[in-house]
């Protein structure tokens, strides 16, 4: 497989997870779109490692590999296809590499809501710092954390719940945690247009989950378009 084909396969994997982007990408210039898609695809790789089902050892090995890979980007020695697009950007890649092991601990259920957010603080700050360099703006580490926890909830259901989310009704517990994440979702900040759009979609998914207790179908294309337009305006 050629480098360009390999890159497209990773980008397509993210696009399939976020079909809303196909509606929203008209609000983003092509050159910005290419960089944003690569960055969001990289973060999706980390989400997949965090939310792995079954034996975590292969995912942990992959996480260690990513740590080495990110450190190599400062010297323009990328091996991963996403690096072809991202490594030219001067960013604190090593700081993100240092924060990746945090994700292993996050798989264990936090004691309570505050602990769930605290577990991801180092990761959230590292992601925000790199994103500021990649996409510009002033991304919020708290938003990174909320988004990561929301994705974990959608991907792993009850495995994402803190121990303090008690009760016998599983769906009620899922809704309870989704509502907590919704309440703690930061208000719109100075993040880049691309991030504002993607976060608007992520927040909308979370709110639908909070009502249903499970992931739901996407709304109409018109509603997606209006949501993207509002987010793009800032």
Image (cartoon, rainbow, N blue to C red):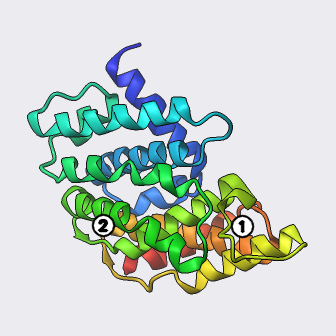
Rendered residue at 32%/54% (across/down)? 99
Counting residues from the N terminus, which is met first, the one under dot 1 or under dot 2?
2
- Residue that badge 2 annotates: 125
Give the x, y percent position of residue 113.
Answer: 58, 78
Between 105 and 187, the one nearer to me in the picture = 105
- Residue that badge 1 annotates: 219
Give the x, y percent position of residue 165.
Answer: 72, 76
Rendered residue at 51%/66% (across/down)? 147
Query: From the viewer's perspective, is 167 left or right of 201?
Result: right
| Label 1 SS | loop
Give the x, y percent position of residue 69.
Answer: 27, 33
The Cα atoms of the two marked residues, 1 and 2, are separated by 32 Å
Between 24 and 215, the one nearer to me in the picture = 215
Name the image quarter holding residue 167. bottom right
Between 195 and 154, the one nearer to me in the picture = 154
Q: Is residue 223 visible?
A: no
| The C terminus lies in quadrant | bottom left
Name the image quarter holding residue 143. bottom left
| The N terminus lies in quadrant | top left
Q: Residue furthest top?
A: 1
Rendered residue at 48%/29% (across/down)? 9
Q: Residues within 10 Å of mark 1 (few under 14, many from 20)?
A: few
Give the x, y percent position of residue 185.
Answer: 51, 80
């Amino acid at each position: 497989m050629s480098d360009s084909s390999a890159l497209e396969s990773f980008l397509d994997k993210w696009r399939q997870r976020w079909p809303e982007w196909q509606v929203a990408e008209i609000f983003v210039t092509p050159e910005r779109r290419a960089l944003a898609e690569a960055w969001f695809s990289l973060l999706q790789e980390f989400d997949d490692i965090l939310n792995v089902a079954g034996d975590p050892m292969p995912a942990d090995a992959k996480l260690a590999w990513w740590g080495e890979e990110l450190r190599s980007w400062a010297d323009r020695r990328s091996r991963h296809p996403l690096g072809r697009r991202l490594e030219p950007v001067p960013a604190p890649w090593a700081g993100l590499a240092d924060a990746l092991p945090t994700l292993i601990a996050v798989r264990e259920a936090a004691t309570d809501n505050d602990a769930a957010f605290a577990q991801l603080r180092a990761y959230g700050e590292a992601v925000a710092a790199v994103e500021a360099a990649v996409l510009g703006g002033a991304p919020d580490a708290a938003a990174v954390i909320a988004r990561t926890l929301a994705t974990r909830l959608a991907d792993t259901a009850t495995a994402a719940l803190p121990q303090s989310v008690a009760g016998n009704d599983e769906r009620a517990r899922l809704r309870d945690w989704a509502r907590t994440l919704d309440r703690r979702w930061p208000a719109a900040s100075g993040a880049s247009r691309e991030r504002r759009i993607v976060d608007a979609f992520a927040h909308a998914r979370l709110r639908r989950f909070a009502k249903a207790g499970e992931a739901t179908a996407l709304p109409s294309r018109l509603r997606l378009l209006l949501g993207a337009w509002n987010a793009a305006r800032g």
